[in-house]
Image: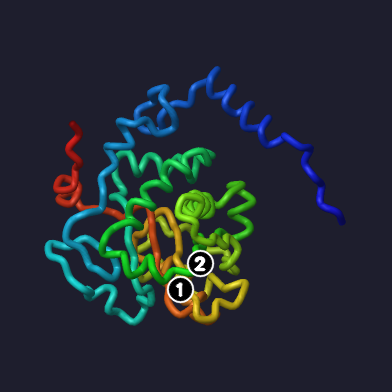
Amino acid sequence: MFATRQPPGLGQWQRFAAQLHDLIFPPRCVACDRMDGLLCDACAQAVVPARGPLCARCGRLYSAACATCALCDHADHVLARVRAAALHTGVMRDAIHHLKYADGRGLAVPLARYLIAAWAAPDWDEVRGRVDLVAPVPLHDSRLQERGYNQSALLAKGFCDRTGLTCMPDALARVRATQSQVGLDASARAVNVADAFAARLRLDGATLLLIDDVYTTGATLNACARAALAAGALQVVALTLALPASRGQERRNVPQLG
């Protein structure tokens, strides 16, 4: 079967139509409902960054910095490094919910900027120098059909378009449908995603960067990492938009807007 070719200039017309639609029906901010884009400037600045003392390996926030912690020293943790861009609260929580559950595909590019900011952190200099490929955490085919898109794949594309890294959206597959991780404790999450992922290709000697939306216990990311390592990857690291925060962390990290 031959691929259908798009008429010349169709892409430009589609972009023009989208711009015209936004001009007539300005998109509302998902956080404050202001007619100033899907994520207005004020709300974008109000995102709470995941900063402060953290575990250098798993990226979790602690009262004091550490090279590794009891959680990532566990045998089930195979990721070499993890970093979240923000706390899963306020604007970021609303934006991620809209991205995943309200056909918020247009948020992928503005949200990918937070991933890029986390990627540029000085303590990730060594990581940046060795990443070969970028892959999103995959959805099972049934969930992909239901939602119509993989939000992590959109984030990965937005990230790679800006960084120039190679994006491989089909590097990993979710080979087993799993229940939602929401509401499950750490042990149940690990069991839920055990052997749920597989690599679609050999990754011999590669350092793979995984992209996902929320990093909670790390069960999903570690399950993906195990699949990549089984396919020959040398190392797997991960970037996510957000991680949960305690009330104390939320107060401590509130940005000062001038």
Closer to us: 210 or 92 = 210
Badges 2 and 1: C-beta atoms under 8 Å apart? yes
Query: Can you identify the residue that label 2 sits on?
Result: 133
Q: Secondary structure at mark 1?
A: strand
Q: Position of residue 58 (x, y in %)?
A: 29, 68
Identify the residue at horizontal 39%, vertical 68% (top origin).
Answer: 129
Q: Position of residue 243 (x, y in %)?
A: 31, 55
Q: Quadrant of residue 225?
A: bottom left
Closer to us: 52 or 176 = 52
> What's the coloring here?
rainbow
Q: Which mark is residue 207?
A: 1
First of labels 2, 1 by sequence position: 2
Q: Is residue 80 left or right of residue 62?
A: right
Identify the residue at horizontal 20%, vertical 53% (top origin).
Answer: 246
Identified by mark 2, the residue type is: Leu
What is the total number of numbered labels drawn onto the structure image?
2
Identify the residue at horizontal 43%, vertical 48% (top origin).
Answer: 112
The answer to whether 252 is drawn above or below residue 183 in the figure is: above
